[in-house]
């Protein structure tokens, strides 16, 4: 019989319709069966007659019942007459795995799955989130900008905009970049939903399965995933204190002829490393000589804590080899989903064609609000403020590492950005440390996820942008305790039996 | 010499830095050249000495100059020493066309290019925009919803959200669909930036180059473009008054084993046609028998002008074969970029993995505002209101066609949606009519762009959602004049010489 839920938000007539429809479609009510009269069913269910009338009308609209004068309402399953083998077993349900394109294996790294599980716990101190701290959001200024644009230009900003983006925002970004001396105009800008989309569009525009891409090792995980998913082979180029090792890059270029060079030259994610001015010019010379596009990913350039970093490649480039990417996810809010590409016009044209297929254009309203926010000078004011605050967090982490870190732990002092890179002492494995730290409610990212070719097993990335100073100290203290515990374990007899450790010589 | 623009928003020290940098990088200032002393250059340019000091400091940061005590500042181009063949001609600039993956030819349809050019003109009456009318936007309600969520949950809504979307919005959509009797929960919903992104994700999840997709002919242009760009072959299935011809679909399924069936069963774009209840059930039976996913694209289901349309395939489906897509671009604002997929969990999982690569997730803020808007009942109230208004526009177009249209012009009366489909009389070509109508400042879409395989040359799509009633009458009058002009031309001696027309027999 029919069951009605009077507390449900679904109207009663639709509940009746839905249940009768299921009974007709699954054969419980067969062709020709008479439904109860509207009056009788209404009485049986304790509802108004009009409720049942509406339900029957809906069933008739789906062709499942027919009302005949004087004969009531009868089931007329529209397929029952033509169904050839109603006695035969129904076909098995669809097996979706057979319909979907097979995925490459490497996407399913259990290390990342574990990391995500740790991250979703509450009450952990996370050194794994490369995002700005929510308590530093310039919320009031943004609210004012949003209210202002909805009041003054709401109707325009809820309409479609060109694929390339909202023109005033493109102009504002071009002006911003002109300060660095980059020769870009609004025509060289494409607005995207964060650098992630930029990388995806670039992969779709430049790469075919089997192509090669030169990347830094370590590099941004999202980029490695996108290039791999496009079927590209990643050619890792190690970093030193001046950034990408160009002697090795040159070998790679000569040997493999990759289609793109991908670099994060400023406050690199994950290493925090910054490419020296000399290397920047030399990289552009290599690109010129090998006729290769350079993809410059620059999410962190605005977050410098001592001197301003060297000019972006885009500004140093004399011949238009650089495709520059940046985002508002770090400077403003990650939840906005807004970034931009600056590149020569033929590149913008092609990326726009692909973006049209991918999602037409970015939210006009979000673009309008961010444009207004920049126009009011709120972005620069915000950046001035948070540079100080993030510097304090970085310094707190450096101080805590010095105070609590075990002997032999090494790190690079980042001059900007959100990331600090550490080399673990005594053959300690990052994977192992991640598990032990999680037990103490601290999360970090093992270095190996950032290496396309293995490597980084004894390195970790620590983010200092997200937790407040007291938690940074507390977290580094716990993390150091976890390291010490594992180091002691290794020195105990039991530790020696641990296969993971016995393969490592003691340093 | 250096040129300073005192009206520019670029600070003077950066203007000096940028110009000197260019002169060093292009060789105008060679290795070892001495720069003017800071004091002298300041005097020469009429700026403060500190301005020049800042400029030189920036140049030093890029490694382009070096200051020595007592010797002033000298150029030290970091590459000049190692540049091996500075005498040789510089390499030619990058040819981007060689770097980009070649595009398939069909994307470059000149007909579409012409259409876009006509659309961008001002003072045209457009029957080519399948978007809601801006003057009907529920702007006040949306502004209130946005203000409310920024006030109460701003910080949360500017943070990242799960790939699948903002959970309360997923719940709200699941509840909405439960009214139709679709057995979906929030777990079956993925939030996307409009149906366009949904189609792109589906293409990436299900199609490899060379695969086949069964589509209606005519069908939604964006979908045809996406499937083609994925390298798929489109298998057209004609429509009749009851929707997709299933006898032909069955042939296609048996003969080609396509990977997907793509349909817009309700108020179809472009034809306005609605699939009958009987066909819907029969289509699901075919999908079940052939173990095939059905992609149901439903942007217009809420826009019914007489009776409610038959239930969506998603609600009639007993076995989970349907991937359902819809969008807020028609019900609310096209500039928002927000839509959703409802599908079995394995499909949602895979589409989410691809969305993570493509753009991480949709704007949390936009999702929060739309969720609040729905929660207040503003969406249902808006839809009740605009159904009436769009019905009036449809009726105005039907009346004007009856009054002004030339003999032999035929059309289907759409029971919902934004589109009206016409068959032109007397062998008139839509391509030709588009050009003539544009001369009279009226834009329409020629039918052939919606056919994957040619066809539709004598058909047009007219949109009645966007222009107000007076302009609909005016536009149809002008369009009819254009048709009459072309028909008369054909009957004149000169018309007979026109190659385009002589290939057509007179009916």
Image (cartoon, coloured by chain):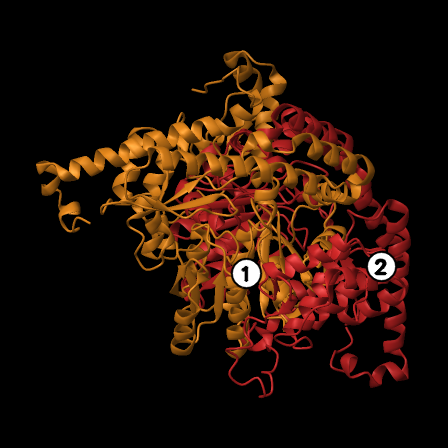
Chain colours: A orange, B red
For the residues bearing labels 1 and 2, Cβ distance under 8 angstroms: no
Dividing the picture into quarters, in which one does residue B228 lie?
Answer: bottom right
Quickly name the residue at label 2: B46
Looking at this view, name the residue that lies furthest to the bottom.
B88
- In this picture, residue B287 sits left or right of residue A136: left
**Residue B184 image point, x, y percent:** 47, 34
Quickly name the residue at label 1: A296
* Quadrant showing the C terminus of chain B: bottom right
- In this picture, residue B480 sits left or right of residue B132: right
Tag 2, which chain?
B
In the rendered image, the vertical position of residue A356 relative to residue A491, given as above or below: below
Are both tags, 1 and 2, on one chain? no
Bin the neighbour count of mark 1 within 10 Å (Cα to Cα): few under 14, some 14-19, many 20 and up.
Answer: many
Disc 1 secondary structure class: strand
**Residue toward you, B28 or A334:** B28
**Residue A46 image point, x, y percent:** 54, 11
State the mark number for residue B166.
none
In the rendered image, the vertical position of residue B28 relative to residue B53, given as above or below: below
Bin the neighbour count of mark 2 within 10 Å (Cα to Cα): few under 14, some 14-19, many 20 and up.
Answer: few
Q: CA distance from mark 1 to mark 2?
A: 37 Å
Q: Residue at x 84, y 83 (%)?
A: B496
Q: Is residue B133 visible?
A: no
Tag 1, which chain?
A
Q: Is residue A22 visible?
A: yes
* Quadrant showing the N terminus of chain B: bottom right
**Residue toward you, A199 or B506:** A199
**Residue B433 image point, x, y percent:** 81, 68
Disc 2 secondary structure class: loop
């Amino acid at each position: 019989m029919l069951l009605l839920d009077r507390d449900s938000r679904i109207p009663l007539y639709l509940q009746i319709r839905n249940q009768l429809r299921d009974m007709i479609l699954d054969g419980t009510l067969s062709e020709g069966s008479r439904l109860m009269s509207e009056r009788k069913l209404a009485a049986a269910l304790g509802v108004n007659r009009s409720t049942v009338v509406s339900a029957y009308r809906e069933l008739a609209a789906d062709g499942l019942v027919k009302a005949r004068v004087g004969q009531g309402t009868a089931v007329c399953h529209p397929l029952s007459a033509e169904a050839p083998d109603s006695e035969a077993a129904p076909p098995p349900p669809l097996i979706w795995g057979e319909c979907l394109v097979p995925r490459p294996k490497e996407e399913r790294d259990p290390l990342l799955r574990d990391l995500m599980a740790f991250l979703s716990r509450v009450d952990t101190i996370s050194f794994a989130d490369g995002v700005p701290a929510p308590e530093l959001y310039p919320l009031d200024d943004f609210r004012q900008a949003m209210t202002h644009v909805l009041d003054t230009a709401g109707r325009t900003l809820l309409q479609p905009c060109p694929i390339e983006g909202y023109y005033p925002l493109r102009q504002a970004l071009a002006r911003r970049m002109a300060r660095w001396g980059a020769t870009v105009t609004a025509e060289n800008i494409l607005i995207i939903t964060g650098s992630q989309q930029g990388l995806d569009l670039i992969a779709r525009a430049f790469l075919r399965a089997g192509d090669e891409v030169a990347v830094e090792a370590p590099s941004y995980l999202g980029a490695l995933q996108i290039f791999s998913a496009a079927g590209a082979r990643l050619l890792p180029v190690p970093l030193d204190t001046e950034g990408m090792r160009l002697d090795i890059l040159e070998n790679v270029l000569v040997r493999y002829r990759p289609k793109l060079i991908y670099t994060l030259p400023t406050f690199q994610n994950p290493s925090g490393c910054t490419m020296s001015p000399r290397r920047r010019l030399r990289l552009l010379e290599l690109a010129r000589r090998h006729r290769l596009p350079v993809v410059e990913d620059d999410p962190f350039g605005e977050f410098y804590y001592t001197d301003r970093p060297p000019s972006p490649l885009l500004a140093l480039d004399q011949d238009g080899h650089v495709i520059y990417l940046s985002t508002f996810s770090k400077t403003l809010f990650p939840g906005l989903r807004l970034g931009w590409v600056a590149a020569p016009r033929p590149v913008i044209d092609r990326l726009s064609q692909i973006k049209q297929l991918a999602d037409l254009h970015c939210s006009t309203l979000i673009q309008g609000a961010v444009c207004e926010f920049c126009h009011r000078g709120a972005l620069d004011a915000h950046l001035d403020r948070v540079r100080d605050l993030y510097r304090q967090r970085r310094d707190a982490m450096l101080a805590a590492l010095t105070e609590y870190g075990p002997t032999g732990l090494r790190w690079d002092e980042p001059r900007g950005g959100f990331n600090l890179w550490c080399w673990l002492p005594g053959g300690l494995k990052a994977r192992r440390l991640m598990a032990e730290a999680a037990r103490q409610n601290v999360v970090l990212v093992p270095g190996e996820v950032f290496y396309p070719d293995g490597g980084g097993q004894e390195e970790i990335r620590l983010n200092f942008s997200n937790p407040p100073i007291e938690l940074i100290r507390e977290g580094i203290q716990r993390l150091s305790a976890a390291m010490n515990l594992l180091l002691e374990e290794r020195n105990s007899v039991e530790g020696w039996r641990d296969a993971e450790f016995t393969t490592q010589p003691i340093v």
